[in-house]
Image (cartoon, rainbow, N blue to C red):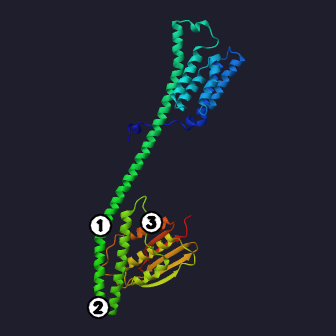
């Protein structure tokens, strides 16, 4: 926080900073100036003064032209506010110092050699010197103020640009830190998980070869296949984590779809009854993937906490929404030991459903079982 941020802010009312008011206010006080000096003036002098005031309406688009239009009124009727405003606008809107100096010099000369000309304008005297200084100050004051306003505006734009640059650098730094952290996590994941899964696969392969029991051999083959598939998915995930960035796209392996659900249910090893009727509608890939992950997570939890329970899996279309229900009945026997879990699976599924514009609910049933229910729309909106 800068010192300026610590100062109490004094915001003006909205009407004080309205564009139309800032445009009309100089015109109004210039007309008042013309009215005050028009008491003894002729009609054509008043006309030139009013023209000078009304010309200020176009001062931001044509600052130099407006300044030239204010000079006749200043020369014949001794008005000040309109030409002063015009000089300020030229200095604030035109970046060329030559134009600012030329316009300020013109106003100084018009103010000094005022109509009607007299011999006193050319006779050296103290009063003439003071009047010359006054004429210079009348032009130099608004010119300096306009230059200051333009410099302040440019500095504000520069500060805003620097602020945006710092924000971009902060985002890039955060992205680099995130990429580095992802790489570190990917290495840790690969070193720990792949080692354990590889051991599982090796042990399952050895059991498959050595056992004479067909059922045990089939189970060992299934375990080995699941281990190999898990290793493939793990390697792909590690590759994504290592190469992910704002300008990098890593091709993903084929993602699971609704057509893969029968195989998933069969390989779960649970006593599951499946009712898969998603209809003929072509569901979006994200919806199919979310439905698959919902069934997968629910079956994984059932395997942990109720492996002997009867499971009911329903995936069906309901209008423009896909309803996914996975429910297990009360298990006959609670497992003595359960696999560890972090409790993040259902949270992730709920977030995935919400991102798609759907809902997900999970909780125990009245008969002592557990149910996961999700509704995923065909499209957001």
Q: Residue at x 38, y 77 (%)?
A: 300
Q: Give the number of callouts.
A: 3
Q: Earlier in the sequence, mark 1 or mark 3?
A: 1
Q: Position of residue 133 (x, y in %)?
A: 51, 14
Cβ atoms at labels 1 and 3 below 8 Å apart = no
In the rendered view, tell whether residue 245 sits above or below residue 253: above
Which residue in the structure is indicated by mark 1?
188
Q: Residue furthest front?
A: 98
Locate residue 138 relative to residue 1 in the image: left or right. right
The foreground one among 268 and 86 is: 86
Residue 58, percent from left and from top: 63, 32
Q: Is residue 126 above or below residue 76?
A: above
Few, some or many residues within 10 Å of mark 2 (<14, 14–19, 20+): few
Describe residue 187's horizontal placement relative to residue 117 as left or right.
left
Q: CA distance from mark 2 to mark 3?
A: 44 Å
**For residue 271, which quarter of the picture?**
bottom left
In the rendering, at what x and y percent does residue 371 appear?
44, 76
Check disc 2 and report its element: helix, strand or loop.
loop
Residue linked to disc 2: 211
Specify which label sits upstream in the sequence, 1 or 2. 1
Residue occupying the point 38% across, 50% down? 170
Disc 1 residue crowd, few under 14, some 14–19, many 20+, Cα 10 Å: few
| Picture residue at 28% right of the left edge, 86% below the top | 206
Q: Is residue 234 left or right of residue 319?
A: left
Q: Secondary structure at mark 1?
A: helix
- Which class describes the residues within 10 Å of circle 3: few (<14), some (14-19), or many (20+)? some
Residue where numbered disc 3 is placed: 351
* Residue occupying the point 36% across, 56% down: 176
Is residue 310 or residue 214 the one in the foreground? Answer: 214
Nearest to viewer (mark 2 / mark 3): 2
- Quadrant of the frame with the N terminus: top left
């Amino acid at each position: 926080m800068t010192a300026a941020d610590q100062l109490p802010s004094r915001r003006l009312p909205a009407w004080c900073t309205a564009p139309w008011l800032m445009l009309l206010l100089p015109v109004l006080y210039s007309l008042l100036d013309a009215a005050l000096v028009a008491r003894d003036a002729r009609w054509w002098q008043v006309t030139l003064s009013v023209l000078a005031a009304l010309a200020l309406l176009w001062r931001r688009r044509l600052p130099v032209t407006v300044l030239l239009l204010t000079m006749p009124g200043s020369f014949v009727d001794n008005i000040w506010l309109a030409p002063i405003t015009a000089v300020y606008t030229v200095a604030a809107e035109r970046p060329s110092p030559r134009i600012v100096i030329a316009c300020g010099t013109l106003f100084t000369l018009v103010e000094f050699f005022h109509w009607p000309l007299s011999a006193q304008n050319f006779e050296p005297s103290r009063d003439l010197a003071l009047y010359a200084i006054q004429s210079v100050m009348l032009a130099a004051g608004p010119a300096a103020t306009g230059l200051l306003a333009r410099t302040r505006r440019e500095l504000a734009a520069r500060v805003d640009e620097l602020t945006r640059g710092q924000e971009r650098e902060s985002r890039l730094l955060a992205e680099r830190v995130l990429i580095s952290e992802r790489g570190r996590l990917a290495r840790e994941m690969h070193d720990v998980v792949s080692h354990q899964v590889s051991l599982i696969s090796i042990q399952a392969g050895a059991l498959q070869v050595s056992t004479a029991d067909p059922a045990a051999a089939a189970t060992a083959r299934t375990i080995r296949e699941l281990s190999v598939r898990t290793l493939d998915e793990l390697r792909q995930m590690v590759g994504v984590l290592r190469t992910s960035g704002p300008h990098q796209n890593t091709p993903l392996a084929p993602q699971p779809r609704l057509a893969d659900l029968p195989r998933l249910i069969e390989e779960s090893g649970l006593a599951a009854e499946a009712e898969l009727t998603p209809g003929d509608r072509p569901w979006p890939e994200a919806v199919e993937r979310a439905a698959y992950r919902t069934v997968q997570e629910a079956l994984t939890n059932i395997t942990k906490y109720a492996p002997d329970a009867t499971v009911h899996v329903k995936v069906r279309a309901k209008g423009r929404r896909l309803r996914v229900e996975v429910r297990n009945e009360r298990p006959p026997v609670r497992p003595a030991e359960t696999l560890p879990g972090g409790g993040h699976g259902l949270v992730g599924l709920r977030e995935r459903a919400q991102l798609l514009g759907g809902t997900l609910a999970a909780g125990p049933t009245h008969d002592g079982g557990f149910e996961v229910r999700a509704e995923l729309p065909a499209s957001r909106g």
